[in-house]
Amino acid sequence: MTLAHRGDSPTATAAATPAPAARFTRRAGRWIDDWDPENAAQWGHHGGAQTARHNLAISVFAEFLGFGVFALWGIVVPQLATYGYTGSAALSETQQFWLLSIPTLVGASLRIPYTFAVPRFGGRNWTIVSALLLLLPAVGLALAVGQHASFGVLLAVAALAGFGGGNFASSMTNISFFYRSSEKGKALGLNAAGGNLGTAAVQFAIPLVVTWGATTAVTGAQVPNLPLAGWIFVPFILLAALLAWRSMDNLSVIAGSGDRGGFEMASRARHTWILAFLYVGTFGSFIGFAGVFPKIMSDAFPAHGLKLAFLGALVGSLTRPLGGVIADRVGGWRVTVVSFVAMAFGALGAIQALQGKNFGLFMAAFLLLFVFTGIGNGSIYRMIPAVFDATATDTTDDGRRRTRRAAAGAIGIVGAVGAFGGFVVPQMFALSKASSISAIAPKGTIVPALYGIIALYLVMAFVAWFAYGRRCAGLGDAGQVGI
C-alpha cells in the first residue's frame, strides 16, 4: 500500500486499481457480466463487436415485425367493405378513422414504460415478451375480422396493435447499451430504419397476401381473404421470440438502471417541450399519414387500388438518416425549418390533386411530404443532445453528466409525445370529412384538414426558427453542429 501511494511500484499501483475486464463473462439466462464496449480489447478481440451485431440483427427483425403489426390496420381498413362490411354492417368514416388512429394512441402511451422495461427485465427477456405480445393483435385481427365482429370489438383489437408501437422504444434503448460511442449512431440508425420499414413492407405485402384463398362474390368482385393479414404474422412472431430466446443477451451492467431522474430533469426543461411540439409535426405526420395513406388513396382514386400505398412509408423511412447527416453539416434548425416548409408544399399539392382528380400529382405531393417527414425526424433527433449541450450552464464533470442524463430523458419524452401526432392526423381527417366548410371544400373531403395541417406546419417552422435560429435565441452560435 505504501509503495503504491509513493508511486515506487507500477506493479503495485496496477494491482491496487484493477484494469477494466478485457473479457466479458456469461452466466445462466444469457446474462453478460463485465460488458464494456469502450474497452478496445473486449470489443475488437474478445467477441464484443460480434455479440453486439448479433443482438442488433435480431432486434431489427423483432422491431420490423412490431412496426408491421402497428401499421396493419392501415392496410386492412380500406378493404373491410369488400370483405363484407357493407349495408347495416358498414363502418362510418369516423369509425374507420378511429380504427386507423387507436393503435398510435396506445403505442405512444407505451413508449416510456417500454423504455424502462429493458433495465427492469433485461433486453433479451423483454424482446421475447414484447414479440410474443404481438400475437394478441395479429390473432385478434384474424378472428375478429373473420367473424365480422362489431365496431367495438374491432376497436379493442386495433388498440392491441399499439404493442407494436411500443417496441420501438425498448428496442432502441436495448441496442444503445451494446454499442461503443463511435458506432452507436450507426447502430441506432440501422435499428430505427429497419423497424420503420416494417410499415412499408406490410403495405406492400398484405394486398398480395390476402389474394391467397380469395373468393368471388355474387357481384363478381373479388373478396380478399382478410383474416390472413393477421395469421401471416404468427410464424414470424414465433420465430422472432425463438431467436431472441436462443441468441440474444441480457446485460447486467444496465439492470436496474432505468433513469427516472433523467426523465424528471428533462420534463422541467422548456426545450424538451419545444422539441416535442416540433416532433409532433414530423414523426407524428409520418405515422399519421402512413396509417391513412392507403385509405386516402383508395377513396380518392379507387381505380389505382392499393398497389402504390407502400411508397409513402418507404421513402419516409429511408430519408430519416439523411436528416441527421445534413443537420450535422448545416444545422438542425435549418433542416427542420426547410422540412416543415416542404411538407406544407406537399400538403398544398395534395389539395390540388384531390380537387383536380390528378393521381400523378397526388403521388408526387404525398411522396414529397413523406420525404421531408423523414428528414425532419432525423434533424430533430439530432438536435436534442445538441440543444441540451448548448444550454447547459454547469460545465463541470458532474454538470456534463447531468446534461447527458437530461438529454437522454428528453429523447424518450420527445419520442413519446411526437408519436401522439399519429393519432391527431386521422382524427383531423375524420372531423374534416364529417364537416362542411363551404368556403374551402364540400362535406366529405379531407381538404379542410389539409389546410389546417399546412397552417400548423408554418407555425412549427416559425417556432423552430424563433427558438433555435435567431442570433438572440440564447444558444450561442446558431450555426453550431447539430443546432
Image (tube, helix red, strand yellow):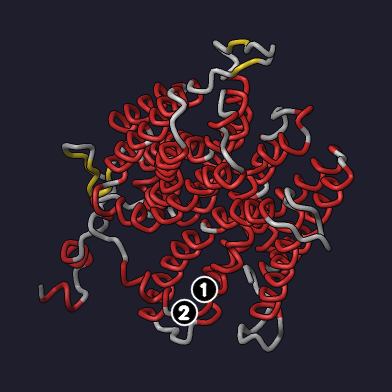
Query: Residue 286: where, in percent of width, then height?
Result: 62, 50
Image check: 268 left or right of 77?
A: left
Image check: 334 left or right of 226?
A: right
**SS class, disc 1:** helix
Question: From this viewpoint, which residue is outermost toward the left?
Answer: 1
Tell me what residue is drawn at x 50 percent, y 44 percent.
Answer: 191
Q: How many marks?
A: 2
**Residue 363: quadrant of the picture:** top right
| Disc 2 + disc 1, Cβ < 8 Å | yes
**Residue 439: quadrant of the picture:** bottom right
Q: Nearer the viewer, residue 260 or 294?
A: 294
| Residue where numbered disc 1 is placed | 273
Q: Nearer the viewer, residue 62 or 4?
A: 62
Q: Is residue 269 above or below residue 245?
A: below
Image quarter where the C terminus lies is: bottom right
Query: Residue 65: where, in percent of width, then height?
Result: 46, 34
Image check: 447 left or right of 79?
A: right
Tell me what residue is drawn at x 70 percent, y 59 percent.
Answer: 326
Give the numbered dot on residue 269. Answer: 2
Image check: 464 left or right of 3?
A: right
Q: Is residue 221 above or below residue 244?
A: above
Image quarter where the N terminus lies is: bottom left
Q: Is residue 324 visible?
A: no
